[in-house]
Image: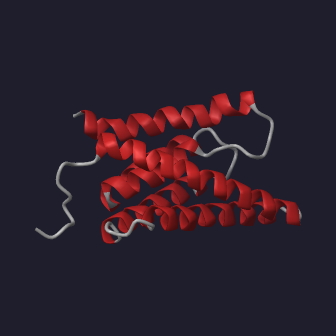
Amino acid sequence: MFRRLFPYLTVAILACIDTSVIPVLTNTWLVPLLAFTACIAFGLILGPLRGSMIGLWGGLLFDSTCAVPFGLLTTLFFICSLLSGFAGKYMRRNRLASIICAVVCLFLFESVMLLAVLIYGRDLSGHLFARAGWRLLMNTVIVQAEYLLFGLICREKTIRYETR
């Protein structure tokens, strides 16, 4: 029971931290996306079905508290969790799977957010791309830490996708 509820509770707590605690503590552009990185890590660990459900849960929590068009973050969380779930399923033996998947998912997230800035009518300048790169690097490291930590807690004793 604990292994089933742990991902949902963790993403809910991290979404609350992301939306209510971190903005109060810092006023910088370099903030971690803890709930998003947790969804990627859980997708890598638990597979595409459970990972996408956790991503949908985290996206709905984020969308209900953020000032972006409703459904944008839910869609991003869902797609990236599903993508990381497939990467975890089919690239299980590759040691670089978690790094490659984190970079691809975070690049997708940053690209869509920069596109949203462009749609809002603001100018894209070089410093926005540089900041996106630094956030991508920082969140990739966070995904690796969460992947190792959550893997110890949530990983099943036998892996369903390996041949017997």
Question: To which quarter of the image does residue 113 belong?
Answer: bottom right
Percent across and percent down for residue 26 are: 76, 33
Q: Quadrant of the C terminus?
A: bottom left
Q: Residue at x 56, y 43 (%)?
A: 34
- Evaluate whether residue 59 shows in this view: no
Viewer-side residue, 146 vs 7: 146
Which residue is rendered at x = 78% and y = 46% of the image? 29
Give the residue drawn at x 73%, y 28%: 25
Asked whether 75 or 103 is in front, the reply is 103
Observer-nearest residue: 20 or 94? 94
Asked if residue 22 can be seen in this view, the reply is yes
The quadrant of the rendering that contains the N terminus is top left
Q: Residue at x 34, y 61 (%)?
A: 48
**In this picture, is 30 found above or below 121?**
above
Q: Position of residue 146 (x, y in %)?
A: 47, 45
Q: How many marks?
A: 0
Colour logic: secondary structure
Left or right, 123 with respect to 90, comes to right
Compared to residue 96, the image places residue 72 above or below, namely above
Residue 4 position in % (x across, y down):
27, 40
